[in-house]
Image (cartoon, rainbow, N blue to C red):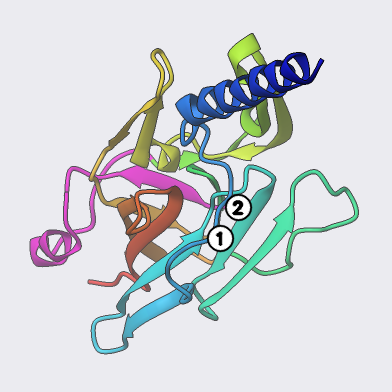
Amino acid sequence: MKRCFLFIIAVLGMMFLSFSACDGILEGIYDYPVADDRNEFGFIKNDPSTHSGTIYIDATDYRRWIFIDFHTQKIDSINVTNSEQKEPEEWDVAIHRYDAKTHNGAVLETGYTGLVALQNAGVMPEGIYVEDVWTTDKIAVDMSGMMDGNIVYAESYFNEELSKWLNVDKSNMPPAYIPSNKVYMVRLKDGTYAALRLTNYMNDSGVKGFMTIDYIYPFEL
C-alpha cells in the first residue's frame, strides 16, 4: 500500500512538471503585461530649443488605451473594456499595444528614417494625410483564445497610417515584429504638426509592448 501511494505521488509530480514545461513553451508569445525594469514613463526627455524629445510608455496591456497630449506633455490611460471610463477631453495621439489613433487628426508616412534628416530637408513632407476610420476587428482586447482563433475585439477609431510603424506578422508563431523605421507626420486637430518615430517596441529585458517614441512638436519650418 505504501509503495502504491508513493508511486501515485511520483506520477502526479511528473504530470505537474510536464504541465509547467508546456506553459513555458508559449511563454512570451502573447506578451501579457509584466513589470518593467525601468520606473520612468511619459515624456522622459525634452529639449525646448529643438522642440524634440522622447516618450516612453507601457502599452503591454491589451485592455488599455494610452493617451498622449503633446500640448501639455501629459500621459493618460483608460481601460478599453470598462464602459464607465471615458477618454480624456484633451489628447493628440492614443496607443493600444501598437495600434494608434488620433484626436480628429490625420497622419502621413514620410520617406524619412530619422528626425534630424527630416529637419535638415527644410521642406514639409508631401502626400495624402490619412484620417482615422471606425473599426470592429483591429483593437484586440483578449488574446487568450488566439490559438483557437478566438480573439475578442473592441470597437474604436483606428489610424491605419500611423499603425504602420510596427507590423506584427502572425502568420507563424511566435509572431515576427517588423518596424517600419519611418518618420510619421501627424496633423493635429488644431492644425499644428508632430513628427513621430517609433525607435523601440520593447524594454531592456526584451518584453514587447514598452514603446519608445522620438518626437518633434511642434514641427515648424
Q: Is residue 91 left or right of residue 24?
A: right
Up-down: is 220 above or below 29?
below
**Marks 1 and 2, the one that precedes in the sequence:** 2
Q: Work out whether 13 lies above or below 62.
A: above
Residues in magenta, as a range:
102-128
**Horizontal and vertical percent for residue 91?**
61, 65
Q: Residue 66, position in %: x, y?
A: 60, 58
As measured in the structure, the alpha-carbon distance from the residue carrying label 1 to the one carrying label 2 is 5 Å
For residue 9, which quarter of the picture? Answer: top right
Q: Residue at x 67, y 62 (%)?
A: 77
Residue at the spot x=88%, y=48% of the render?
83
Q: Which mark is residue 104?
A: 2
Q: Amino acid at mark 2?
A: Asn
Q: What is the residue that sits farthest to the right in this orientation?
A: 84
Q: In percent of the image, x 49 and y 26: which residue is there? A: 26
Is residue 12 part of the magenta span, yes or no?
no
- SS for dot 1: loop
Q: Amino acid under label 1?
A: Lys
> In this view of the protein, which residue sits in the foreground, 6 or 101?
6
Identify the mark at residue 107; answer none if there is no mark.
none
Residue 192 in view here: no
x 37%, y 73%: residue: 218
Count how many numbered circles sit on residues in the image.
Answer: 2
